[in-house]
Amino acid sequence: MTAAIEAMLSRLVSKLAAWLSRHSIDILRISLGLVFVAFGTLKFFPGVSPAEALSVATLERLSMGLLSGYAAQAVIAGLEVFIGLTLVTGRLLKTGLVVMAGALAGFFAPYVLFFTDLFPGAPTLEAQYIFKDIVLAAAALVIGARALGARLVPARAAL
């Protein structure tokens, strides 16, 4: 490779790294917010969300029966949409992240509350559905770090 091509590639990589360090966490925040808004909105309509029965049963158990049925589903839907809107807009972001921390604990609660139902041998579809929330939790950690002042900066790389 010639020195000119290496220099051009180095500049290109540096520019890309700078762009990613400026924008990637905001893109992650907005896309995570859209996921929360979409899944939360589904829960406002009975019978539409594939997680409806499991989420209602979980909130019924966690609330010791105070919330059940559609009321439980509406609370979950409202929380998810609220979280999503804070992520998409960036407004009340820290509040949304605190609510999301509680919601994520609730997302994983079925593993404790209904373990034998979710894992009668091989994991059920519901168990697999919950498992993907690990990615949501990891994204929330990155967004939370940014909200608390952490910054992503490009490393000085040599090609």
Image (tube, rainbow, N blue to C red):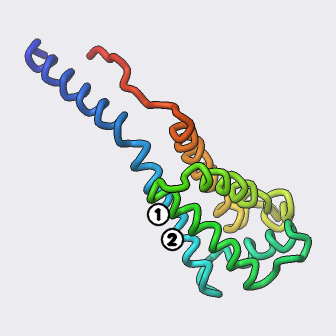
Secondary element under disc 2, as helix, strand or loop, is: helix
Which residue is disc 1 drawn over?
Answer: 34
Left or right placement of residue 105 versus residue 9 in this view = right
- The x, y position of residue 52, in whole percent, is 69, 77
Q: Amino acid at mark 1?
A: Leu
Which residue sits at x=51%, y=31%? 150
Report the front residue among 35 and 118: 35
Classify 10 Å Cα crowding around label 2: few (below 14), some (14-19), many (20 and above). Answer: some
Tell me the CA gap for discs 1 and 2. Answer: 6 Å
SS state under label 1: helix
Instruction: Residue under label 2, please give it.
Output: 38
Residue 24 vs 17, above or below: the answer is below
Image point (38%, 42%), residue name: 24
- Amino acid type indicated by mark 2: Ala
Q: Residue at x 83, y 68 (%)?
A: 117
- Which of the 4 quarters of the picture holds residue 41? bottom right
Left or right side of 113 for 123: left
Please state if 23 lies on the left or on the right of 88 as rendered: left
Q: Are marks 1 and 2 in contact (CB under 8 Å)?
A: yes
Query: In which quarter of the view is residue 132 placed?
Result: bottom right
- Image quarter where the C terminus lies is top left
Residue at 35% over, 37% down: 22
Coordinates of residue 158 in the picture (x, y in percent): 29, 14
Tally of numbered discs: 2
